[in-house]
């Protein structure tokens, strides 16, 4: 059977894609064409059809009513994997944009794409999101949002100048325990918050290299001299910021960062690929970067980043101290006046499970990152369907991501204090916490 690309498919009227292709403006309501949960059809594109891109493409095809007019990846084979997925589910082939790293700009010229999923290496997220918003496409961005302070401002301005929605998909905000703590904080269990520890501690030495020992995009990122320090803060800082309400009632104010010498990546590279391998001489990120951050309301957050020291993965490194209670991901919960000692976190699930979690937890647990990968997709489509601003919006995203350049600058300046830019321009005092109870 001849395979149709999407345009031919639409021209011949071979299926439900016809409805989408002639739908007028973005977010137009289409007749319920499938049994999927949303009766609205969204026209999506994926930029970066690698692991994460395919994950979100599959979730969209399986769970939502989507049309996929286009895919972009400068690796032809990656784009073609996505094409096969779309063909299998929707019966046509999307157009592909594979002509180099800037071909996404051509994709953004299309008027039949409502939303883009940006799932490229981290340094592309900012420029691609800015361009997408300027092209009036809704944005689902992988973490982090941006890598420089200026990029953060440009992203804020681009979001302010359009009606298109911006969502940073920080999936670790949506694990069961992190959502439960959020719910308990908002119910007053912790009282006033004073201190938290959080970290991304995920030994990922093997993920930095191609098979021949050359550096892949992760290796290139972690040996970029302008970014050396914490290149990936939002998995740790995102959930913590939600608990403190940053920037929604409190705001990051200052930080200092220190880094230990770079040993583990180099040693690993020499051992695995030899003393002349690219990783043996690269200017690697230090083994540990530790930041101390002070908030406007006087709380202190300890943030650690370590992706190369040999140790088992510690995905949930979070502690939280309030005036009335304490949480420690390993020790458990302690509520003053009620607990005699640490109590298992699981004892608190029944009472404080977040309603968003309760509604979707069972299905979510079938997906990755403690269910977080389910919730980010769920939330994004809900915001599109109900035309509401996502709960991790551009101000949350750039504030949490600012620890990348700030930690790098502090390390370069021997631990000097850095002022955190207030991307909300004072609005953090009035910005309300997002009500996640309805998703
Ligand atoms: N939230 C999470 O838990 C989580 C987990 C893993 C990765 N990530 C993030 O997701 C992003 C993607 O990670 P991944 O594991 O899918 O990586 P990947 O290497 O599997 O996929 C990235 C894809 O982007 C493509 N690409 C690179 N530059 C491009 C460009 N300019 N235009 C078009 N395509 C381009 C690559 O060819 C590749 O196919 C990264 O930013 C990563 O940090 C997040």
Image: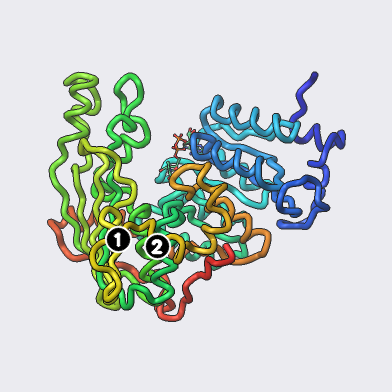
In the displayed structure, would residue 379 be above or below residue 433? above
Q: Identify the image quadrant of the C terminus.
A: bottom right
Give the residue at mark 2. 348
Instruction: Tell me: 259 left or right of 325.
Output: left
Instruction: Tell me: 8 left or right of 415.
Output: right
- Residue shown at the point (71%, 51%) measured from the top left: 37
Front-lying residue, 380 or 93: 380
Can residue 419 be seen in the rendering of this structure? no
Q: Secondary structure at mark 1?
A: loop
Front-lying residue, 212 or 433: 433
Q: Is disc 2 in contact with disc 1, using a CB cutoff of under 8 Å?
A: yes
Q: Which percent across, then down, holds residue 15?
A: 83, 37
Q: Which percent across, then down, holds residue 155?
A: 47, 60
Ranked by sequence position, the earlier of labels 2 and 1 is 1
Give the residue at mark 1. 343
Q: Secondary structure at mark 2?
A: helix
């Amino acid at each position: 059977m001849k395979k149709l690309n999407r345009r031919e498919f639409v021209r011949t009227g071979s299926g439900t894609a016809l409805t989408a292709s002639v739908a007028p403006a973005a977010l137009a309501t289409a007749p319920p064409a499938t049994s999927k949960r949303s009766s609205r059809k969204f026209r999506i594109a994926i930029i970066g059809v690698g692991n994460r891109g395919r994950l979100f493409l599959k979730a969209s095809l399986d769970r939502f009513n989507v049309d996929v007019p286009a895919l972009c990846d400068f690796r032809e084979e990656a784009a073609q994997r996505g094409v096969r997925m779309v063909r299998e589910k929707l019966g046509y082939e999307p157009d592909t944009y594979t002509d180099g790293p800037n071909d996404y700009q051509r994709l953004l010229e299309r008027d039949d794409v409502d939303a883009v999923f940006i799932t490229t290496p981290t340094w592309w997220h900012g420029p691609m999101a800015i361009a997408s918003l300027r092209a009036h496409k809704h944005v689902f961005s992988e973490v982090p949002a941006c890598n420089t302070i200026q990029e953060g401002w440009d992203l804020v301005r681009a979001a302010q100048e359009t009606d298109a929605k911006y969502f940073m998909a920080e999936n670790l905000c949506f694990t069961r325990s992190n959502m439960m703590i959020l719910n308990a904080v908002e119910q007053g269990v912790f009282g006033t918050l004073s201190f938290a520890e959080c970290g991304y501690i995920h030994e990922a030495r093997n993920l930095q290299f191609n098979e021949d020992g050359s550096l892949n995009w992760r290796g290139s990122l972690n040996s970029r001299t302008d970014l050396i320090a914490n290149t990936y803060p939002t998995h740790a800082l995102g959930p913590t910021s939600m608990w403190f309400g940053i920037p929604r009632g409190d705001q990051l104010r200052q930080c200092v960062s220190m880094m230990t010498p770079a040993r583990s990546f180099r040693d690993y590279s020499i051992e695995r690929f030899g003393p002349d391998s690219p990783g043996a001489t690269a200017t690697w990120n230090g083994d540990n970067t530790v930041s101390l951050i002070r908030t406007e309301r006087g709380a202190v957050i300890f943030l650690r980043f370590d992706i190369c020291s040999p140790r088992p993965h510690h995905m949930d490194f979070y502690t939280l101290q309030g005036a009335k209670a304490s949480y420690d991901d390993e020790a458990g919960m302690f509520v003053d006046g009620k607990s005699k000692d640490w109590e298992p976190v699981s004892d608190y699930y029944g009472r404080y499970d977040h309603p968003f979690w309760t509604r979707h937890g069972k299905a979510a647990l079938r997906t990755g990152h403690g269910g977080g990968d389910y919730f980010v997709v769920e939330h994004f489509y809900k915001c599109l369907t109900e035309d509401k601003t996502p709960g991790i919006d551009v101000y949350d995203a750039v504030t949490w991501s600012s620890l990348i350049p700030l930690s790098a600058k502090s390390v370069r300046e021997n631990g000097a204090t850095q002022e955190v830019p207030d991307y909300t321009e004072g609005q953090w005092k009035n910005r309300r916490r997002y009500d996640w109870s309805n998703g």
